[in-house]
């Protein structure tokens, strides 16, 4: 059930305000003392010109370490949350998200194949390998689900099987092809890590996620129709095959760029679409921006906690999202079963 325009506008504006404050606060949190005033002066100097009055170390902490990492966390959270909302509507399954359906595992395997084995390193690159792996995972899940009857429960079971398959293949590639130091680094990345965030990755994620979100907003009416089933969508004039293929490619592309930047991060796309629907209803033109804001804010704070709670040691952000997301997943799973 939808909400009034005034309420929706309030949620959007409130979400943007919370996101802005979260980014500003996260940049100031860490072992090196960089206060809010230093961040304001630094940003002001970069935007308006002039000198910030900060030394080179403080500038490097803000612009080379914390700010790109915080922005990348926001973008990855927004992208994963949008993918979850699209997949849950497209597949009519409240438990669908890139992690549960094995898409993240497929993207991880594709990225590891390029990085560790060097396959396609000079042509497709890490991001291209992740994209191809995500598409392969999607194809396997849909094929298995179709062969098993095509019900929503079969889609989730097929996703579980795909997750195990690609996780096993990824582990096999890493342990048989890497030296010990590379193995440790790759495994930490696979658990989800934003420690190596760079401005180039921030820009790439921003472009891809903006394009993917635009595609989803353009097809918002079709997504609304898909919630009633393929036959209902076709009766309303939706080209089911083309729309499904376009949205699957869009979600695969977003998942690929997120995985190539941050590793495999689960449960963001599973839980937050349900929270967004409770806030603003099920209409996707309204839902998509809200779920993107929720995902961005959540992952900023999860990543911030992951890097400071056991400082100087970092907790992989994928581990932290699992600790937060598993209880929420149980709630969604139980509620879905009762319905």
Image (cartoon, rainbow, N blue to C red):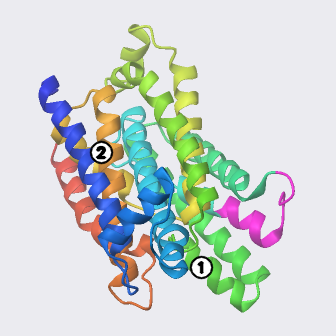
The image quarter containing residue 318 is bottom left
| Residue 283: image location, x then y, percent | 27, 26
What's the residue at 84%, 57% (across, down)? 120
Q: Main secondary structure of the magenta part?
A: helix
Badge 1 is on which residue?
187
Q: Return the residue nearer the eye: 176 or 339.
A: 176
Q: Is residue 235 left or right of residue 184?
A: left
Q: Return the residue nearer the eye: 227 or 322.
A: 322
Above-or-below relation of 290 to 134:
above
What's the residue at 47%, 78% (across, down)? 58
Badge 2 is on which residue?
273
What's the residue at 44%, 84% (across, down)? 314
Magenta region, residue range:
109-123
| Residue 63: image location, x then y, percent | 52, 67
- Work out whether mark 2 precedes mark 1 in sequence or the reverse, and give the earlier one: 1
Q: Return the residue nearer the eye: 309 or 190.
A: 309
Above-or-below relation of 91 to 47:
above
Q: Please tell me whether mark 2 sits on a helix, a strand or a loop.
A: helix
Above-or-below relation of 194 to 127:
below
| Residue 30: image location, x then y, percent | 37, 81
Measure how far apart labels 2 and 1 are at the Cα level. 29 Å
Q: Please tell me whether mark 1 sits on a helix, a strand or a loop.
A: helix
Neighbor class of circle 2 (other Cα within 10 Å; few <14, some 14-19, many 20+) is many
């Amino acid at each position: 059930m939808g909400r009034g325009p005034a309420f929706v506008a309030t949620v959007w504006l409130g979400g943007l305000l919370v996101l802005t404050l979260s980014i500003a606060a996260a940049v100031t949190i860490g072992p090196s003392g960089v206060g809010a005033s230093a961040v304001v002066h630094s940003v002001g100097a970069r935007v308006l010109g002039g000198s910030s009055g900060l030394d080179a170390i403080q500038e490097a902490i803000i612009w080379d370490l914390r700010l790109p990492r915080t922005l990348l966390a926001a973008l990855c959270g927004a992208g994963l949350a949008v993918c979850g909302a699209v997949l849950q509507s497209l597949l009519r399954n409240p438990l669908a998200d890139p992690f549960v359906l094995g898409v993240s595992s497929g993207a991880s395997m594709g990225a590891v194949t390029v990085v560790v084995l060097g396959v396609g390193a000079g042509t497709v690159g890490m991001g291209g390998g992740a994209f191809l792996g995500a598409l392969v995972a999607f194809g396997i899940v849909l094929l298995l689900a179709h062969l098993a009857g095509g019900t929503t429960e079969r889609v989730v079971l097929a996703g579980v099987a795909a997750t195990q398959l690609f996780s096993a293949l990824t582990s096999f590639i890493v342990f048989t092809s890497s030296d010990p130091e590379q193995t440790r680094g790759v495994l930490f990345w696979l658990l989800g890590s934003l420690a190596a965030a760079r401005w180039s990755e921030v820009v790439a994620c921003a472009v891809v996620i903006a394009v993917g979100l635009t595609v989803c907003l353009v097809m918002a009416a079709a997504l609304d129709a898909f919630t009633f089933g393929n036959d209902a969508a076709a009766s309303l004039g939706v080209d089911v095959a083309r729309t499904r293929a376009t949205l699957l490619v869009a979600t695969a592309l977003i998942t690929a760029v997120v995985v190539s930047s941050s590793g495999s991060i689960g449960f963001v796309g599973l839980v937050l679409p349900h929270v967004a629907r409770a806030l603003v209803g099920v209409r996707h033109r309204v839902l998509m921006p809200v779920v993107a804001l929720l995902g961005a804010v959540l992952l900023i704070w999860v990543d911030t906690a992951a890097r400071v709670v056991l400082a100087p040691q970092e907790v992989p952000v994928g581990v932290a999202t699992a600790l937060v997301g598993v209880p929420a997943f149980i709630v969604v799973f139980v509620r879905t079963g009762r319905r």
